[in-house]
Structure formats: structure tokens, C-alpha cells
Image (spheres, rainbow, N blue to C red):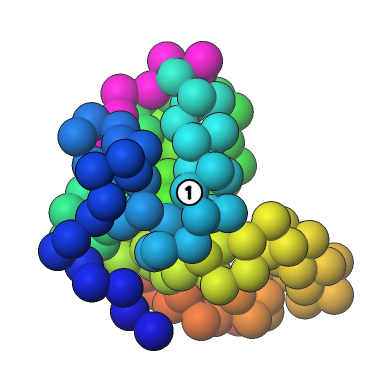
Amino acid sequence: MNAAASAYPAHMKRSRGVPMIRASRGNPQSAAITRLALAYARLWGARICFDAEFGLFVCNGMRGGYARGGTTIGGAFLTGREPARSLLRHEAVHADQWATYGWAFALRYLFEESRRRGASNRFEIAAGLADGGYRDS
Ligand SMILES: [Zn+2]
């Protein structure tokens, strides 16, 4: 079910004028995760903007605190430098996965990673290996 994208309740929490529910794909649990991720990103010196095309908060310029080229937590992508559009497309799928599973996504992802690492991880395959910068293996 896709909640009416145009009509957010006035009381909905916002960041940078953007309803949290948009980055969290309508999942309140993912919205809570996203808020924590934004607070965490600020501690690492992030500049935060909202990418309207992919519905993702981009937390750029972080001094550290993320893995690989960046990490998506809820509806927030945490990274150190300006990401390519293709990478944001990949990370937006991870935001969808957070919205699908809520907090359990962290455990599901780590469990999957323990069995099938990197480019074999089904969550990475679903997000698009080429977009995510994975080499064919
Ligand atoms: Zn990925």
C-alpha cells in the first residue's frame, strides 16, 4: 500500500523541511532509524541534504563513521564525498530494504554477509552490483 505521497500529516517530523516519512518510505520504524542516523552523521561533521530523486538524505563530508564508500542507515546515506548518481540509486534500494524490514534489516544484512560476502550478498545483488561499485566475481 502506498500512502498518499502528497499529503503528509502536519505533525509529521521533518528534517530540512522534508517529512521523515518520505526518506523512510512510509515506515515509522525506518523514520526513527533515519533520525538516529542523521544525528550520528552530524556528530561526524556531515553536511546533510535531501536527494529528491532517490528519496534519500545524503550525509556528505563525514570525517569517518561509515563503511566502504558509504553506508545507508534507514533513509540516510552516510559518506565522505559527493556520491555518483548511480551509487545513490544503489543506496536507495538499501533504504527500501530498511523500510521493508525495519530494525531487523541490520541483522538480516549481517547474517547474509556472514554467509555470502560482498558481491554475493543478496541485498547487494538486489541493489545492483554495478551501481554499488562491486566488481564482477
Ligand atoms: Zn550496497
Image position of 102 (left or right of 30): right
Residue corresponding to mark 1: 31
Q: Quadrant of the N terminus?
A: bottom left
Relative height, residue 49 to residue 119 (above, below): above
Classify residue 62 by image quadrant. top left
Q: Nearer the viewer, residue 1 or 55?
A: 1
Three-letter residue code for mark 1: Ala
**Residue 106 image-quadrant placement:** bottom right
Above/below status of 129 relative to 61: below
Residue at screen point 83% across, 67% down = 111
The residue positioned 31% from the left and 66% from the top of the image is 89
Q: Percent from the top left, x then y, of residue 115?
A: 85, 75
Relative height, residue 72 to residue 135 (above, below):
above
Q: Is mark 1 within 8 Å of ligand 1?
A: no
Q: Magenta stretch: give its range.
A: 43-50
Q: Is residue 105 above or below residue 128?
A: above
The structure residue drawn at horizontal position 51% and vertical position 15%, both measured from the top left corner, is: 43
**Residue 18 left/right relative to 122:** left
Q: Position of residue 92 (x, y in %)?
A: 37, 63
